[in-house]
Image (cartoon, helix red, strand yellow):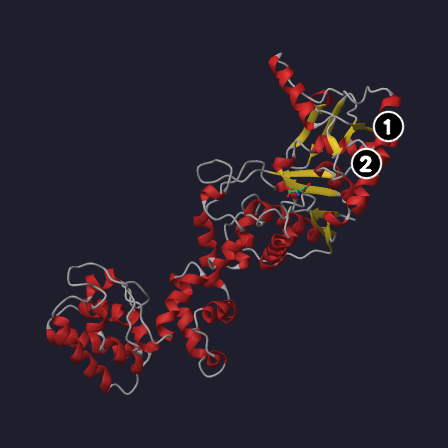
Amino acid sequence: MVKVRFAPSPTGQLHVGALRTALFNWLFARHHGGSLVLRIEDTDVSRSSEEMTRAILEALKWVGLDWDEGPIYQSQRFEIYRQAAHQLVSLGRAYYCFCTPDEIERRRQEAKARGQHWKYDRHCLHLPEEQKSELLKKGAPAAIRFLMPEGVTEFNDLIHGQISVENKNLEDFVLLRSDGFPTYHLSVVVDDIEARITHVIRGDDHITNTPKQILLYRAFQKEIPQFAHLPLILGPDRKKLSKRHGHTAVLSFRDQGYLPLAFFNFVAQLSWSPGREERIYGREEMIAGFSLERISKGSPVFDLNKLQWLNSRLINEMPVAELIRELRSWLEKRGLWKDAFLTEKKDWLEKLVELVRPRSRTLVELTDMLAPFISNQVDYDPEAVRKHLLDPCLEELLPKLIADFDQLKTFTATELEQVVRGRAEKEGVKAAVFIHALRVLLLGRSVGPGIFEVLELMGKEKTLARLDNLAEARKVIEETGEVKNGRSTKNNL
Ligand code: GLU
């Protein structure tokens, strides 16, 4: 049975690269009906934190990834790693090393001065037996090093193909440090053996670790899993993706209003896609189509525009009721949620969301668009006011329009359009003068959906109150033309 693992170190937030690793392990496990183990690699106790672990689990859950075993915490397994290291010593595959970091550093510098490449010089391998026992008896701090065998280590990476390394280029790496803490190589192999992992799928940055780990499997006389290393993700400047390129933490994308399925698609499509089309694929479709062999070898470039595109596509494709479920917490955070949205105002909200979603790339933008329809307050964009509300003719024309609107028994887009265009004609001004002014007065901004639908959904009462707000809106611009805080203080409808 296929068994894979995702093994994050909780020394920081879960970032895009690690999420892609988790995602491909998950897809691979689900595709093969296998299982996924979640292992928290927190052996570096000083750099790991429970808070980070919680954030990692939260990020995985947000994207919709689950696991079948774990989380297993390496920090609870130190004794197991110690025993394993001593087992290798008794098998003659590892040895005690008493060298202090200072001594090693000195010899490294000497080698450097001689122009030699340094690797551990096996000083302790050659200590006489009596001296070793003496030191151990005295309790001298001792690390355990792997005894690198001669020869060549080869493996067939499922993404990169055949890889081979001459063992003479590898050193007798440390398995257990003198303070009793295991190194990454030891703990990872011990755990993967115990969990009977069949496939190790992880980032390219681990490719150089794999030969050492394969040698450890051999030393333990255990079956070696298959390896697949995912290509490094690059930023738009084609350098390794990092914080320099902006947000890379998974949860920050949640906080920017991306939908989990859009983010799932984006991260998967960095290196693989179930089809040729660039679109949102369902999770089941992804699972059905997944294959490691089809992951591209080349380094993908992280392109935020693509994420925005996928997100707005999903915002527009998903059933509106589902979108409203996603939006609820956003509206709540802004104090805009009303329980009536589940009952008598359900249809109204659905129509409104339908109206504004074509212009929204994220849930944040969508919430911003909805706000003026729900809230009693409008945030006037000073630029929009300057552009469309300073025309002196508005003082005279707007009251006329208000009177026209006031007479309407029903408030539908078609009627409203007739009224606005009719009034413009009568006054000899372009309808656009009204349309632009209305948009700014009602929404606070100069861009938005079709104004007549906006008016209809805003409703008569709110519309009339806002049209009365010209002076108030103009206040966001100081006499000098300096921009003031764009918030209207008046609590209008
Ligand atoms: N803990 C390692 C990391 O976060 C992963 C180890 C592995 O997958 O072998 O990079």
The quadrant in which residue 228 appears is: top right
The label shown at residue 379 is: none
Q: Earlier in the sequence, mark 2 or mark 1?
A: 2
In-image side of 160 versus 414 (left or right): right
Residue 127 pos. (x, y %): 82, 20
The amino acid pointed to by label 1 is Gly
Q: Look at label 2 and name its amino acid.
A: Ala
Q: Is residue 258 visible?
A: no
- Numbered label attached to residue 85: 2
Residue 419 appears in view: yes
Real-space Cα separation, disc 2 to disc 1, in angstroms: 11 Å
* Mark 2 vs 1: CB contact within 8 A: no
Q: Is residue 466 above or below residue 246?
A: below
Sort mark 2 into few (<14), some (14-19) or many (20+) by Cα contacts within 10 Å.
many
Query: For the residue labelled by badge 1, is the local secondary structure a helix, a strand or a loop?
Result: loop
Residue at label 1? 92
